[in-house]
Image: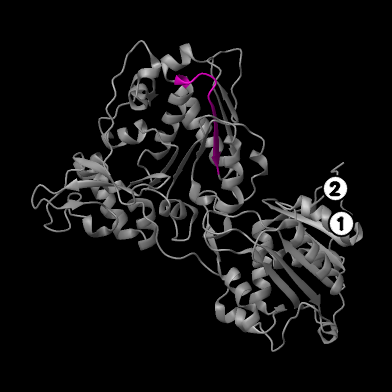
Amino acid sequence: MLLNVNRKADPNDLGSYTRSQLTEALIHLEGEPFSFQNYEFYRPIYDGNWQALLMKCGRQVAKSTTGNNMILTNSIAIPHFRTLFVSPSQGQTARFSHSRLQKGITYSPHIRNNFTDPSIPMNVGMKHFSNGAEVVLSYASDDPDRVRGVSADQLVWDEIQDIIYDAVVPVVNECMAESEYGWTWYFGTPKSMENTIEYLWQHSTQDEWLMKCEGCNKYNYVIDDRHIGKTGIICVKCGKNLNPRKGIWYSMNPGAYIRGFHVSQLIMPLNNESEKRWSRVLYKYDTYSESKFKNEVLGVSDAIGTRMVSQEDLENLCRDYKIKRKPDKKMFRKVSKIVAGVDWSGGGSSEYASRTVIHIWGLMPDGRMKTLYYHIFPTANAVADVREIISICKDYGVDLVCGDAGGGAVANAMLVEGLGAHKVMQAQYGSISQHIRWNGKDRYSVDRTAAIDAMMLDYKNGNVFFAHPTQMKPAIDDILAEYEEVTKKGDGRRVWRHFPSVPDDALHAQVFGRVGMEVAKGTMEFYPINMTGT
């Protein structure tokens, strides 16, 4: 599928401009009017009427500039238009706010003189325009709570590869539920094959910049290093230099809901026309690791995320006993504390519905935790599932239940009603400086990375054990779905992720059970749940 954008502009009517024309007319960059002279392949991206847009890019290909320009032009052209910008961290959002958005407003004379009001202050988290448009800037990596409640017409996700899809993206996208526009735009640089951006790419049109070789007439697009020549990008068939100025966008997966564009450093005209610039590409090719070069230069995903434990490690934790819905008294031998963790169904991505999972740990004299029972509820039937979980907890004589509060506050309230407030606590993942702390109202806040780290170390060090491997296989598969990545250089946080189409609910049920065990042992003080939050 080829893009063909052909619109005429009336200089007296902002609404008649295409977005690219409005960008050139209004926006100044580094003291000069913005020009598409060396970025013509971006025009169709700017001018398309995309309900959902993905830009999968290498570094330094004008990705952030594109996002900034599109935010500004929509804000200028559409009165009272509301944009919500979300990046993974406070620092990244602040940098975008200051070095991109505010500079675009301040140093673009037409915008500064006609669309700003000195009486309305602008700050890092909010930009106002005199036509009533506004931009809210926030951040979320693994916890969407900070962004809940914001209403928007457009959601712009920056560095989407460092944001956990299932935990954050669907929740925050609901900020546009009441908008007549509901535009969702994703920008990022690839990482592993299991990353959020790769998941979105697989559900996109996968547009590539198609260049016809003037030597052999072969059409080329860049996804690997075969196109790297001595002086520029080359044809994979005959080796002749290609002209990236002469290309068309072509959809490899036409008809997909998300319009996805892949932008590599190799298709940038200036990189091919400057000996100095191309020498930088060759230097990176010689010095970067293969994965880094693919991610940051070619703009393609590569490799598998790092896993702390292997299937063999987890299978070695299994013992020769079977778990049953109705417990056998032998299961409780030497067990001093019994704690359940529950990960409630949150709906999940389009490829799978997340499941409700209960995992019951028993504390042994040597401090290890024994799996007494676990169950994955295959379908989301909230009331029936909660009733069954209450029954399971009573049958197993559970001392304490730790329920996920992120999407299960109502279900946890039902647990309180069925088991008593003295037996129920709830915890919610987030990014906090402490491993775990009471929020002073109704739940424990748990640092997601630290909590999963602790669980993984328990697996690695043999501090837990499981039932027979045939029964534990679904739970082991969920644990193996989780992999570790390091976020963007400069931030450098480690985060645990999973490919959005692969479930990991059984892992989180175990983690919440582990958190509950810390409270049951007295490591953390127990606070009764006040479901009113007062």
Horizontal relation, residue 196 to residue 434: left or right: left
Tell me the amino acid under the disc marked 2. Met
* Residue 145 at least partly seen: yes
Query: Which dot marks residue 202?
Result: none
Residue in view at x 56 percent, y 45 percent: 88
Outermost residue, bottom direction?
320
Residue in view at x 60 percent, y 26 percent: 123
- Determine contact: label 1, label 2, CB under 8 Å: yes
Tell me the amino acid under the disc marked 1. Val
Residue in view at x 75 percent, y 80 percent: 324
* Residue 525 at least partly seen: no
Q: Nearer the viewer, residue 337 or 325?
A: 325
Horizontal relation, residue 41 to residue 508: left or right: left
Which element carries disc 1, helix, strand or loop? helix
- The residue identified by callout 1 is 416
Name the spot of residue 64 as percent of width and height, x first.
43, 37
Q: Residues within 10 Å of mark 2 (few under 14, many from 20)?
A: some
Would you identify the image quadrant in which residue 260 lies? top left
Instruction: Determine whether 50 is above or below 313 in the image.
Output: above
Would you identify the image quadrant in which residue 339 lies? bottom right
Name the spot of residue 174 as percent of width and height, x first.
60, 40
Horizontal relation, residue 439 to residue 163: left or right: right
Q: Which residues are magenta?
A: 76-87
Q: Nearer the viewer, residue 182 or 400?
A: 182
Quarter of the C terminus within the rendering: top right
Horizontal relation, residue 68 to residue 340: left or right: left
- The residue identified by callout 2 is 531
Would you identify the image quadrant in which residue 246 lies? top left
